Image (tube, rainbow, N blue to C red):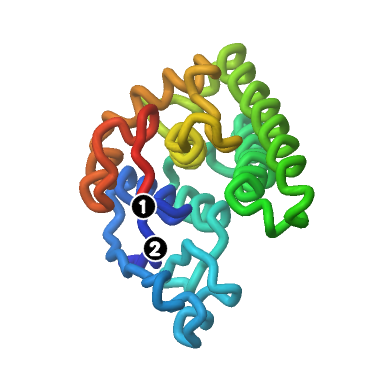
Amino acid sequence: MYTLYYVPDWASLSVRFVLEELGAPYEGKLVDNSRAERDSPEFRAISPLGLIPALQTPDGALFETTAILLWLADQHQSMAPEPGSPDRANFLKWLVFTNNTVHNLILNLFHPERVSSVDSNEVTLQLARGQIQNALSLIDRMLQQDQPAWLSADDPSILCYYLALLMRWMNGFEVGHPANIKSEDYPALHAMLVELETRPASRKCAEIEGLGETIFTNPTLL
């Protein structure tokens, strides 16, 4: 049994998608962000920087989204190419690229004040937007050309759900906001999202966190 420490519609949602897809037993523990529960000694003992998600496992506590996702895939021998397989290197390359480039740049769009002064916020926003668009173009081109088995909604990997969550956030921002980047501009990625949002795991997570119907392609953010 796992315990997922989560805030609705945060990065913890990618872990919930994977847990549901795996059929792994877990309980969700809501971390009350409005009451600064992430700063409590109890939660800091699990996630030292107070970051969401965190996952309590029989092997101890895990934090950092990519670490949790990859650990679950390896632990359950599912949703990722196995260590030593020919596809493992390419999979890891794009998984880490998604984390280090796409996810981090999205956070810059959400919180430009963390990386720039008020006077340079607009420059930071536009720079991050352009870099994200370039990164998504690379992923979309790779998906169209290579059609890797580990990036298919028919048998989704942890990377499928990670990308789907990030695209959910960007699809959900109001038009005119720099973070509003539409998945329709990336046809292969968008097609994957259309299929992925109808899977039972996606529907179950949507019900649990109150996400609505088209949770990836036309979402309403919480």
What is the x, y in percent for residue 11? 47, 53
Give the CA separation, mark 2 to mark 1.
Answer: 9 Å
Q: Quadrant of residue 134?
A: top right
The disc label shown at residue 16, or none: 1
Name the secondary structure under disc 2: strand
Left or right position of 129 against 45: right
Name the secondary structure under disc 1: helix
Amino acid on which the number 1 mark rests in the picture:
Arg
Amino acid on which the number 2 mark rests in the picture:
Tyr
- What residue is disc 2 on? 6
Q: Quadrant of residue 221?
A: top left
Furthest-top residue in this view = 145
Please tell me which residue is depicted at 48% across the width and 75% down the height of the picture.
38
Earlier in the chain: of badge 2 and badge 1, it is 2
Q: Nearer the viewer, residue 198 or 152?
A: 198
Q: Quadrant of residue 27?
A: bottom left
Furthest-front residue in this view = 119
Left or right position of 93 against 154: right
Please tell me which residue is depicted at 67% across the width and 23% down the height of the picture.
138
Instruction: For marks 2 and 1, give the one nearer the viewer.
Output: 2
What is the x, y in percent for residue 165? 45, 41
What is the x, y in percent for residue 195? 34, 23
Q: Is residue 193 visible?
A: yes
Query: Disc 2 vs disc 1: Cβ atoms closer than 8 Å?
Result: yes
Please tell me which residue is depicted at 43% across the width and 56% down the height of the picture.
12
Assess disc 2: are there few (<14), some (14-19) or many (≥20) residues with their C-alpha within 10 Å of its C-alpha: many
Q: In this figure, what is the number of numbered marks?
A: 2
The disc label shown at residue 5, or none: none
What is the x, y in percent for residue 187? 50, 15
Please tell me which residue is depicted at 38% across the width and 71% down the height of the picture.
31
Q: Which quadrant, please, contains the N terminus?
A: bottom left
Q: Nearer the viewer, residue 155 or 139?
A: 139
